[in-house]
Image: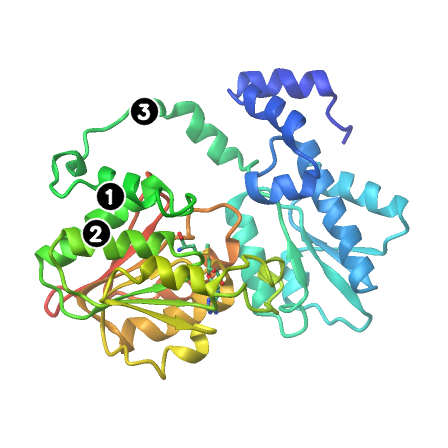
Amino acid sequence: MRREGAVSRLVRATREGRLLQVIGNRIKRRPVANHVRWHGAADQGDAVQALTTWGREMVRDKPGTILLVGSDDGVRRLVMRELSKSGVALAVLSEDELAHYDADTPVAGVLCTAVDVLGQARIAGLINAHPQLAFLRFEYVYGLDPAQRRFAQWDEYAETFFVSPVLLQDPNPYSIYAESLHHFEQKCGLRDFLDLFQMLTELVRREVPGDIAEFGSYKGHSGWLIARSLQALGSDKQLWMFDMFEAFPDEQWGVDQFWSSTHAVDFGDVRDKLAAFPNVRLVKGDFTQTLRDSAVQSLALAYIDCDSYRATRYLLDTLPDDYIEPGGLMICEDYGHPALLGNRVAVHEVMDGRKDFARQFSQFSGLYMFTKLTKGTA
Ligand SMILES: C[S@@+](CC[C@H](N)C(=O)[O-])C[C@H]1O[C@@H](n2cnc3c(N)ncnc32)[C@H](O)[C@@H]1O
C-alpha cells in the first residue's frame, strides 16, 4: 500500500473531526514515539514512526528477530519497509502461528501492527500466555481503531454536560478537588474523582464494612482526595496507601517493561502531605509482597491505579476472595486509558469468569467498577 500523503491525511482528519489534533501533534510531538505512547497516534504516519522507533530500540537492547503480529491495514507493510532499511530481521506471524511459536533463534521483541483494540488485546493475551515471549518487550499503538472513530462521529452528546447527582451533593466534591490542587500537581483527573466520590459516598451510605486501600499512590493526589472525602463524609474508615513510594518496580512482562523505574517520588513529601489524616497508613514497597503482611483484614473499596499487568493481575487474583467485603467495590482506574493494555488484559483474564461481581464501566471517567454481590444476588 502507498503511504498516505500529507494533504490527503489532512483532508481525512478534517472529515473525521481530528484536524486540530493532527496539527497539534505535528507542532508538539518530539520525539514522536514518546508522544504517541501517551497521546495515541493521530494517523497512520504516527503509528508507523512510533512502531519503527520502538523496533529499533528493541534490537539495540536485545539483538534478534522482531516478530510482527496483527492484521495488515498498511501499518505492517510500512513498518517492515522502514525497519528493513536498517537491516533488522523481521518475521511476520499470524495469531495462530504466534500461539505455537517456538523461538529457536533470539527474538528482540514483538510489534503489534493491529490497530483495533480487540485485536491488540487478543495478541497481548497470547503473548502473556507464551512461555518464551511473555517477557519480551511488546509494543502497540492506539488511537486508530475504526470503531472508536465511528463512535466519535456519532456521539451526539460529545459537547454536552449532564446534570450529575454530585452537583446536588453536600459535601461538594468540586470544592474538595479545588482544595487538593493547593497541595498537589494534578494527577488524579476530575472525572476520576467525581466517579470515585460517588462510590465513596455510596459505601459510607450503605455502611459497607472494611477499610479502603489504594494500590498505586504515586505522589499522593488521589489518596489525599479519598482521605479528605472520607473526612468530609464523616467516615472514620481507615485508608491504606500502597506504593513503592520511590519509582516503579522493574517490570519483566513485555507489556509492562516501559514502566520500569518511571514515576520517581519523594516519600517524605507524600508522608508530610498526608500527615493531617490520622486514618491514613502508607505502606512502602512492592504490594505484591507487602499486602499479605500488612494489617489489612478486609476492604470496602480497593482503588487500583498501578498501571501494570503484573500488579493488576496480582490484585485481581488476590482481592476478590480474600479481602473485598460483600457489597464492596474494586475500581480499576487504568482500564480506560488506551496506553494501559496490560491492565485491560488482566481485568478480562480474571474478571470475565466471575459471576459474583457486578460491573460497570464509566464512559465518563474510564474507571471500571466491580461490585461484589451480596448473598442471594449472586
Ligand atoms: C499512576 S501512578 C498512581 C497515581 C495516583 N493514584 C494518583 O492518581 O495520584 C501508579 C503508581 O503505582 C505504583 N506501583 C505500580 N506497581 C506497583 C507495585 N507492584 N507495588 C507498589 N507500587 C506499585 C507506581 O510506583 C506508581 O507510583
Report crowding for label 2: few under 14, some 14 to 19, many 20 or more residues within 10 A (C-alpha): many
- Closer to us: 126 or 311: 311
Q: Earlier along the polypeptide chain: callout 3 or callout 1?
A: 3
Q: Where 338 falls versus 374 (above or below)?
A: above
Q: CA distance from mark 1 to mark 2?
A: 7 Å
**Marks 2,3: beta carbons within 8 A:** no
At numbered mark 3, what does the secondary structure look like: helix, strand or loop? Answer: loop
Tell me: 378 left or right of 192. Answer: left
Residue 319 location in percent, x, y?
Answer: 32, 72
The Cα atoms of the two marked residues, 2 and 3, are separated by: 29 Å
Instruction: Identify the amino acid type marked 2.
Output: Ser
Q: Position of residue 20 (x, y in %)?
A: 55, 20
Q: Earlier in the sequence, mark 2 or mark 3?
A: 3
**Viewer-proximal residue among 188 and 377:** 188
Query: In the displayed image of the protein, which residue is found farthest to the bottom?
Result: 293
Residue 72 showing in the rendered view: no
Cα distance, mark 3 to mark 1? 27 Å
Left or right? Give the position of 208 relative to 212. Answer: left
- Dot 1 or dot 2, earlier in sequence: 1
Badge 2 marks a residue whose secondary structure is helix
Rendering quadrant holding ligand 1:
bottom left
76 sits to left or right of 21: right
Q: Are marks 1 and 2 in contact (CB under 8 Å)?
A: yes
Q: Count residues near mark 3 (Cα–Cα under 10 Å), then give few for <14, some for 14-19, many for 20+.
A: few
Element marked by disc 1 = helix
Whole-percent x, y for residue 2 in the image: 78, 28
The residue at which mark 3 appears reads as 157
Q: Residue at x 62, y 40 (%)?
A: 36
The residue labelled by disc 2 is: 229
